[in-house]
Amino acid sequence: MSDSNPTACLLVIGNEVLSGRTQDANIKFLAIGLGEIGIPLREVRVIPDVRDTIIAVVNEVRAKFDHVFTTGGIGPTHDDITSECIAAAFGVPWEPHPEAWARMQASYKPGEFNAARQRMGTMPRGASLINNAVSIAPGFTMGNVHVMAGVPRIMQAMFAVLAPTLKGGKPIISRAVYALRLAEGAIADGLGAIQDRYPALDLGSYPYYRPSGNGVAIVAKGTDVAAAEAAIADVTALMITCGATPVQGEPDPA
Amino acid sequence: MSDSNPTACLLVIGNEVLSGRTQDANIKFLAIGLGEIGIPLREVRVIPDVRDTIIAVVNEVRAKFDHVFTTGGIGPTHDDITSECIAAAFGVPWEPHPEAWARMQASYKPGEFNAARQRMGTMPRGASLINNAVSIAPGFTMGNVHVMAGVPRIMQAMFAVLAPTLKGGKPIISRAVYALRLAEGAIADGLGAIQDRYPALDLGSYPYYRPSGNGVAIVAKGTDVAAAEAAIADVTALMITCGATPVQGEPDPA
């Protein structure tokens, strides 16, 4: 779908997600936010805090996608190595950023702007800052790579500032219909035929299992609202021929 | 850490995670489960239901990691293409699996084992089944690639059957300590020195922001319990020198 839209890749950088300590909360937020500005997310990679891995992956994906977003690894500790790895990936010095450094220095009491915190004011040469309302330490953009915090509320504040500066395509919209007590296997053949009639849409089939009852939800995504509504109308009719009672929209989460 | 352990890569296959419709729940579960059997997760990729992408990524990562686990794309609908892509990646036919086919056929009423459902009994030649208690349609293992459902409760039932059959290394264990009202930047330099003394461990620093108070948690992970406990004891002492009141374990999630 929407091949004319710019594309995005997200790198989630951090051992804590790979070890299962932390439940990622950034993928879904950015997937939705990027869809809304018409820069659909095409791939996510979760990678460890390992220098050679970060550098290699950044260089691979920044050549492959229009935009790369990273979360994690820009704090003050020894495992926060994203910023210096971005500099290495771009082959530029990692050096104090005058504006970021000055702001951070001013925000700490004398003696507290220590070596660890100074790392957060150190950036690849040529980076432009992503200032935000929540954290004194900024994110930054280097080329088509946008480097953000891993803590969700800081990441979200950075994305709120960053998003309006990006040139997106048509927003990705979705329409949905669901039916209780309908197996996806019962409508799968008919659904495939509908997908064939709307090649510019993604038609997804999602069975669900809930205390309120099991069923299947069908979601049409793309950039063409009229096509999505027409496809969902066709799915609704298909569900009725299978004896179900479809309801437009997403099923109740409970 | 633990370079002698076999390694794992997880492929989350599905447009629904990339579009933000679905919050992934499988990464954390598998990260923890794989750590427990000593096959630490080293990379996750979330990729779309696109044939060429799936084939290329499967072939890339199955050469790079000891085990590859996939979730998603093995249902009956047109966007469920994982199984046939695995066959293409391995260069083998995609054909009815006698055991899976017979079991599924027996479970449906006459006429309901339709073309769409027959796809779930069709597998790469040479696949061995991952039967499970929840879903009649099995997952399968092909070489070092383990293909599981995307629906969490079905995936978990499959992993429960699969995990005991895998030869893992030493379990990955963790020890933690946290302190309220302590900034990670205050201990970062000392923490880096502790990390240097325990090169076989991963020491992670995780600030948290909660209604009950802000603080920082330090987690030591590795295969050596004694080393992890010694490192956490050192971190505890460091926190005390910074004027904090450390508590062993992870902070209260509330």
Image (tube, coloured by chain):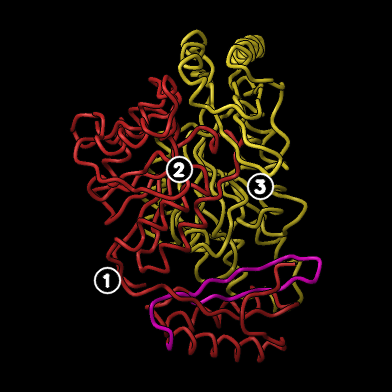
Chain colours: A red, B yellow
Looking at the image, the residue that sits furthest to the right is A211
Name the residue beneath numbered marker 1.
A4
Q: Position of residue A104 (x, y in %)?
A: 37, 34
Q: Which mark is residue A135?
A: 2
Give the vertical position of A250 relative to B218 (above or below).
Answer: below
Give the vertical position of A232 relative to A134 (above or below).
Answer: below
The C terminus of chain A: image quadrant? bottom right
Mark 2 nearby-residue class (10 Å; few <14, some 14–19, many ≥20):
some
Going by the numbered disc 2, the residue's amino acid type is Ser
Q: Position of residue B198 (x, y in %)?
A: 52, 11
Q: Specify the quadrant of the image occupied by residue A251.
A: bottom right
Name the residue beneath numbered marker 3.
B130
Q: Chain of mark 1?
A: A
Secondary structure under the numbered disc 2 in the rendered image: loop
Q: Nearer the viewer, mark 2 or mark 3?
A: 2
Mark 1 nearby-residue class (10 Å; few <14, some 14–19, many ≥20):
few
Q: Position of residue A109 (x, y in %)?
A: 44, 26
Whether the magenta-drawn stretch holds residue A210 is answered as yes
Q: Chain of mark 2?
A: A
In the image, which residues are magenta? A203-226
Give the vertical position of B170 relative to B163 (above or below).
Answer: above
The chief SS type of the magenta part is strand
Whether the magenta-drawn stretch holds residue A29 is answered as no
Marks 2 and 1, how far apart at CA:
35 Å
Q: Chain of mark 3?
A: B
Q: Position of residue B226 (x, y in %)?
A: 66, 9
